[in-house]
Amino acid sequence: MPFSNLQLMRDSRRDLAPQWGLGVLVAFVYVLIIGVPSSIFPDGEGIVSLVLAGPLAVGVAYFSFAVIRGETPHFFQLFEGFNVFGKSFLANLCYSLLVIVGFVLLIIPGIIVGLALSMTFFVMADRPELSFSECLNESWNLTSGYRFKLLGLNLRFIPWYLLGILCLGVGMLLVIPWYYISLARFYEELKVARRN
């Protein structure tokens, strides 16, 4: 039986419940690191985000896996992606370029490419022996046949993000860790689906 996005979100919220404070801290620092350089260096905001986004995405994946796998998550997992800086930077660069090209080609291809490659950093955290191109390829293969379902999961979070924005943006810090934990669970479900 195919997995349910709604159940996946409920399970993610349950797993995150004892770690919600830590999840908020990780989300806050993540947003701070990505956002603050943009305000300090407005001319180079895209470059700073491009350099830091990949390693931090891997770090968020490490944290998310620790939560759903019953391990002990810790704050410094956010920075463990810098151990594979070159690989995560190249993966993020390729991901960003491919999505931009897809959006230039009438938006829909950009959404498809974004969904197809969205598991790249979870693959990188889960299988560190793979190269950046193998991680991109693995994400593409894993999401094949499940991209519409992944789109559905993303759409389910839109009202929560809007609610977070209405709460002076502070509510976003509650939604961000829940979203990433849900993506990590989605990744685990994709691995199970591939084995069956």
Image (spheres, rainbow, N blue to C red):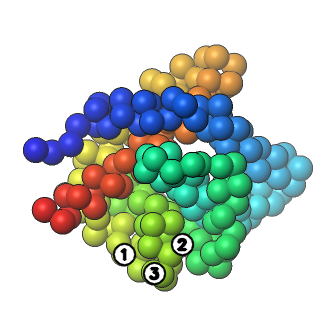
Q: Quadrant of residue 29?
A: top right
Residue type at the position of mark 2: Ala
Q: Classify 10 Å Cα crowding around label 3: few (below 14), some (14-19), many (20 and above).
A: some
Please provide percent x and percent y for residue 94: 52, 73
Looking at this view, name the residue that lies furthest to the top.
167
Q: Name above or below for residue 123 compared with residue 188.
A: below
Q: Amino acid at mark 3?
A: Leu
What amino acid is at disc 1?
Asn
Q: Is residue 11 above or below residue 69?
A: above
Mark-to-mark CA distance, 2 and 1: 10 Å
Image position of 122 (left or right of 89): left
Q: Residues within 10 Å of mark 2 (few under 14, many from 20)?
A: many
Q: Residue at x 65, y 38 (%)?
A: 22
Q: Quadrant of residue 156?
A: top left
**Residue 6's spot in the image, x, y percent?**
29, 31
Disc with the residue nearer the chain's start (1 vs 3): 3
The residue that mark 3 highlights is 130
Q: Secondary structure at mark 2?
A: helix
Q: Nearer the viewer, residue 143 or 177?
A: 177
* Mark drawn on residue 91: 2
Q: Which residue is mark 1?
A: 137
Mark 3 residue element: loop
* Residue at image location 65% in from the left, 56% down from the top: 77
Answer above or below: position of 170 versus 25: above
Tell me the SS state at disc 1.
helix
Q: Which of 178 and 18 lies nearest the eye of the viewer? A: 18
